[in-house]
Amino acid sequence: MTKKILEITGSLNCAGIETLLVNVLKNIDKTKYKIDFLVVANKKYFYTDEVLKFGSKIYTYPFKKVYKFLIPFFFLKEIFVILKNKYDVVHCHFYFSSGIILFLAWLCGVKTRIVHSHTERKMFAPKILIKPFTKIMQKIIDIFATDKIACSKEAGIALYGNNSNFKIVNNGVIIDKFKFNSQIRQQIRESFNLENSFVVGHIGRFVELKNHYFLVDVFNEILKYKKNSVLLLIGEGPLEEKIKEKVKNLKIGEQVKFLGIRNDINNIYQAMDVFLLPSVFEGLPIVGIEAQTAGLPCFFSDNISKEVRIINSYFLSLKENSEFWAQKIIDICKNFKRIDTSEQIIKSGYGFESTITAFENLYM
């Protein structure tokens, strides 16, 4: 008998959580599991067509301009009606607000109720609201979740607390898709006119936590050492225009390429010489695993979970200035030799086969 699973998340855009879930949808045993999605806002997302192609339903509830963590409270009736469709599993990726959804799932008789923490982020809302809200939600999650999982130890502690039991499920990647390929590297670099360039890469939404302002400052310093440097920025978001303005003011527009959302990110990694992720905070970023799978030297802020480190990973403090970052990057990359790192990635448990097995075990 096929088990019906409902994934509850913010969107189906091209971002870490969504990419993970779509990869699970594509690779899971279809004879045993049927996956549907509940997302915020009735609109076409990056992955909408792909999800529908696999026969999944996409439920939506209207978007309200309130703090994101309050959204489920405005649509309790709508969520309740959807859950009454007799799902066997509810898998919730809505951070602390998962508590109210798990309670509704329990009321509707859903037997397996999973909550999944993907980040150690702080919540953007008045502090007077946050502390009591998080305490209440942690209690509700403890009571109504049958399984508590996280992408890293820090992400688990952030949602469940220091003394809570939870299981870590690695955000695996499809190794063959991302592993280093010199032929693809040459093709992509030629197509972007990057043959003689030192290519710095970043993938992430243009939002505060990704720290693009500092990233651009670091690249500007790199240019002082290597005039042939080019920065590739993949993603979109509310701060994109402000970052473009900063690039313009620094007069480095010809060296910075805004590539938007792409469906060939695996190939873009090949063209890079170094990957930067100076985030203010994260859980365990999938892009960090992808970049290491592509054999790149990776520079992360020390606010990112150290569990992302597999090979060729370096952590730098955001207390250091952009010149310090640039010097470290130049020094380390000077004698760096790109190799196939796929064996190390698999041994570390980040091959996607391990992730699929973990998800299927949860859904049994």
Image (spheres, grey):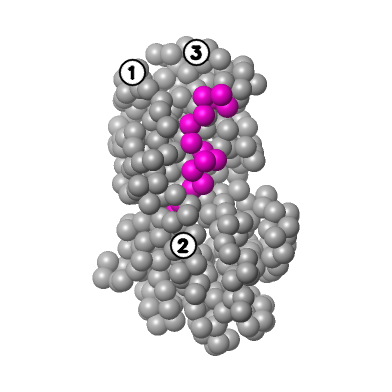
Percent across and percent down for residue 28 are 57, 62
Mark toward the viewer: 2 or 1: 2
Q: What residue is rendered at 66% in x and 81% in y?
A: 85
Distance from Cα at disc 1 to Cα at disc 3: 17 Å
Q: What residue is rendered at 36% in x and 66% in y?
A: 167
Q: Which residue is mark 3?
A: 228
What residue span does the magenta drawing correspond to? 171-185
Q: Earlier in the sequence, mark 1 or mark 3?
A: 3
Distance from Cα at disc 2 to Cα at disc 1: 38 Å
Percent across and percent down for residue 345 are 39, 43
Mark 1–mark 3 CB contact (< 8 Å): no
Q: Amino acid at mark 3?
A: Asn
Q: Look at the image and tell me whether residue 288 can be seen.
A: no
Q: Which residue is mark 1?
A: 335
Q: Residues within 10 Å of mark 2 (few under 14, many from 20)?
A: some
Q: What residue is rendered at 56% in x and 24% in y?
A: 183
Q: Amino acid at mark 1?
A: Asn
